[in-house]
Amino acid sequence: MFSYCTDPKALSDAVWLSVPWLEHSFLTKWIVDFINSLPWFSCYLTSAKHVDFYWSFLTVLLLLAITAPAALGMGFLGATAARSHVAPVSWIGKVYIWMVRGVPDIIFFLFFVIALDQAIEYSKSLLVCDGQAWPWQGLEFRVCPEAKVPLAKSAPFWHQAYGFFLAVVTFAIVFGAFVANVLYGAMQAVPRAQLETAEAYGMNRGQVFRRILIPQMWVYALPGLGNLWMILIKATPLLFLLGVKDIVYYARELGGSKTQAYEYPHGDWRLWYFLGLMVFYLVFTRVSEIGIAKLTRKLSHGQATAAGEALRKAAA
Amino acid sequence: MSMTCWETIQAYGLRSIGIGENLLPRSDFTLCQQFTLIGSGMIWNLYFGVLALAAGFFLANAIALARSARNPLIRKPAEWYVFVFRGSPLFIQFFLAYEALVMLPKGGVDILGIHLNTAWTTRAWAGALLVLFLNTAAYSAEIFHGALKSIPKGDLEAAEAYGLTGWKKFIRIEWPTMLRLGWPAYTNEAIFLFHATTLVFFSGFPAFQQKGDALYYANYFADKTFNPFIPYPIVAFYFILLTLAVTYFYGRVNRHLNRHLPSNIRSKIRLRPQLIR
């Protein structure tokens, strides 16, 4: 990155600041040592691999940016299905909502990533392979090479992108079930009288749903959705388990001890990298918490709830 | 080498704690083997869950009280403790704890002439249990703190009218009411702590001699057979049973806490999702 970084080996011995009389005191010596280590750190922290590490934070944000709306969509479908008057549709919705309650979600994560991958490759094999046999043979899952997703000869980028795609779909399915649960509760919480009044005005079922139920349910759903958002943030390190090169992957890679064979040899620094990740998550959840509190205040304005009443009284 | 199912259970039923057959099955996986080994792994999930909850309950009460203290020297550390453990992923907490424990000197430390061995702290049974204990204490403390704040004012005034003050008021009125109000949420916390125990062997803490929890073995089978459709539903089945058992047990306690109330104002337990923390 910087011009003086071309020879990292020379950096560790280079002395920028040499003030012999300062080295007598423990504190001032520490400060001098610190200043002298700055060039090394400025090169170390801007190495190519570290730049990849910084980009991987964007992977996490990208996952959140795609997953949150996708899960909201899945959840909305699930909640609507559970409220359906057609029995089989309502069963599907309810099973979807109940599915993640009794079972640790990490099981779903591990399951869906393989199951989706196999389902995609099996469906593709039916199209592109001739004479595809049942793929689960003995101890392997076998489809013809043309049916592999992505193809073995594809660039590493596509393998990463496919892994990320599977992770996003898995997150959307699992979190969709949680969102469905929250939205289902919120739809039930909208006062019956509101819906009956709308019906008395001659609205049909679709109109009541669109014009009355949907706009009013958000204020009831917000605490639950806010909670889920925090949980979603805290679930992102699972990307690592799903095989995506995320921040946990890089923290482990970069933090592991490096011998003299590497450009920047150092001891086992994983503790410091994980501390960094911890601070990242703490700041992220704290900022979200403040944001959600503000949003709740805004949405409660003029609502017939205790929070709305409190706002009204404060203003009066 | 074909075993009857009973023989399989004898060989692998306690495999997760190192009793029985040493080698895990490598080929010709039977349904019975998968059920037995994954069930054997549940011993660890129970171990982590039960001990962390039991110990965490006491710390949670202390932290909840500290959070309500008027003295900032007591209140602030409690608030920070809860913030750190609730604001960061359990996954990262496991990693961090493992790395920190590994850094302890290998040969042990000498404190005041007593030699303390430190190697065992990096083992899952101790290290991961510590993290789960601290983690559930933080979540439960937040629940109990909320419950403490929502004790009806009338109850406290009535207690004072009866001449109850200080410690007596706390132990006879505030604490039981706090438990009663917080119990439904605490039930959820217990369920999701049991779910969280599946993270232990996936983050930091290695499984020595392939002694792992239910998910560890399920993952082993899924990796070996390339077929996720059998082992994962088996773990799911075990966890549904566990969730039902926890709900039943905590429901009994809830009934006990609410026994003096008329049936229409008793607090009911409703399952709320919390998943990965």
Image (cartoon, coloured by chain):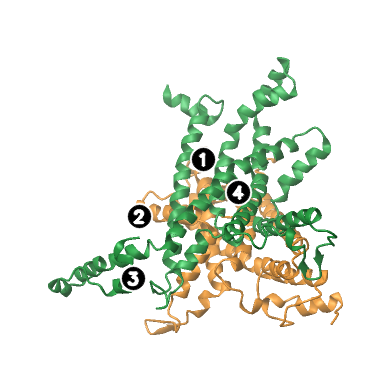
Chain colours: A green, B orange
Identify the element where label 2 is drawn. Answer: helix
Q: Which mark is residue A8?
A: 3
Closer to the eye: label 4 or 1: 4
Using the numbered discs, state the Cα–Cα distance from disc 3 to disc 4 in whole angstroms.
55 Å
Using the numbered discs, state the Cα–Cα distance from disc 3 to disc 1 in whole angstroms.
74 Å
The residue identified by callout 4 is B185
Q: Report whether residue B165 is seen.
A: no
Using the numbered discs, state the Cα–Cα distance from disc 3 to disc 2 in whole angstroms.
47 Å
Q: Is residue B237 above or below residue A203?
A: below
The subunit carrying tag 3 is A
Closer to the eye: label 3 or 1: 3
Three-letter amino acid code at the position of disc 1: Ala
Identify the element where label 3 is drawn. Answer: helix
> Left of A203 or right of it: where is B145?
left
> Left of B222 or right of it: where is B73?
left
Identify the element where label 1 is drawn. Answer: helix
The residue identified by callout 2 is B73
The residue identified by callout 1 is B158
Residue placed farthest to the top in the image? A201
Q: Residue at x 65, y 76 (%)?
A: B210
Q: Tell me the crowding category of disc 3: few under 14, some 14 to 19, or many 20 or more residues within 10 angstroms, Cα based.
A: some
Identify the element where label 4 is drawn. Answer: helix
